[in-house]
Amino acid sequence: MWVQLEVFLQTLISGVLLGGLYALIGLGMTLILGVMKIINLTHGQLMMVAMYVAYWLFTLFHIDPYVSLLIAPPLLFLLGMFLQKTLINPVLRVESILPHNQVILTVGIGMVLQNLATIFFTSDYKSTPVDYATDAWYLSDYWKDAPFELSLSYPWTVSFLLAVGITTALWFFLAKTDTGKSIRATAQDRDAAALMGVNVGLMRVITFGLGSALVGAAGCLFIPIYYLFPSLGSQFTLIAFVITILGGLGSTMGAILGGLILGIFESMTATYVGMGWAPVGRFAIFVAALVFLPGGVASLLKRKAVTK
């Protein structure tokens, strides 16, 4: 029984650590969706670009992937603003027979980024062999008489804590700064925000840059843990999309909870069903959210707030 409990707790810890990183990925897509009302299907490819930046900084200059957080996200912020201003904004102004043509545009941008990465860097798997990749903290190091042994991977723990710090900084930015309040006002009612003097066009550009920087930060946190290859972005675009649906469209709190739920669910599926079943579990929870909880976790939070 102790062994089963130990396995369950270890799986739960792994799921929470993974969910924290997933939440950071989902936050970027949710932020863009909330302000621009479009789903950015190039989200994972932007993360892939940030991972290549971190990889080359490590390979050429021996810069630790965590230190590259100071370089890659700002570059992704500029790239995101460039994409929004030069490609997405013009499409938003054009009346097309295709519904949601801006969403289709993001798919095209993602394909271009992925193919450029394949041309320049080949499709070979790459990694950053940091010295601490296999280090871990053990419960018995701090509690000698612990009834079971639990461990925390060093890179997973550091990545999780940094993701929590970035999420807290994002909350502070959105809640306490004038630009953050303008972004929230644009997300709630674009016309009313414009009437109150908010530069809606500028907020859109900043929001896309901010969403790109967030997923870029997630890429820097994933590179010490995951292998890197050009088609990696498609996988994480799907994950971000599932988190957005599970959390509730446009809800930042829902994205955090959705990321944690998905991380724990995938971890439990991998342990108790099989490693290969984790993507199946992801798809199952996506379908279940659409059928049984179409408003996502955010709808439950709103319902609870109304009933109080």
Image (cartoon, grey):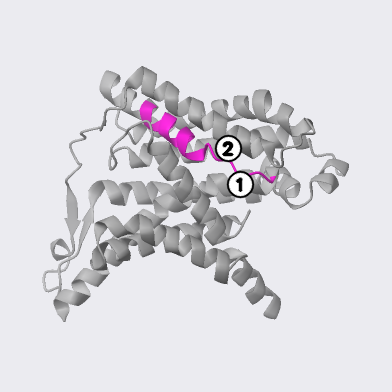
Q: Secondary structure at mark 2?
A: helix
* Image-quadrant location for residue 2: bottom left
Q: Is residue 38 magenta?
A: yes
The residue at 41%/54% (across/down) is 20
Give the magenta part as a residue range.
37-52
The residue most toward the right is 195
Q: Which mark is residue 210?
A: 2
Circle nearer the N terminus (2, 1): 1
Amino acid carrying label 1: it is: Leu
Q: Which mark is residue 31?
A: 1
Is any atom of residue 209 visible in this view?
Answer: no
Picture coordinates of residue 197 (x, y %)? 84, 39
**Residue 165: where, in percent of width, then height?**
45, 49
Mark 2 to mark 1 CA distance (whole Å): 8 Å
Quadrant where the C terminus lies?
bottom right
213 up-or-down from 291: above or below: above
Tag 2: amino acid? Leu
Q: Which quarter shows the N terminus? A: bottom left
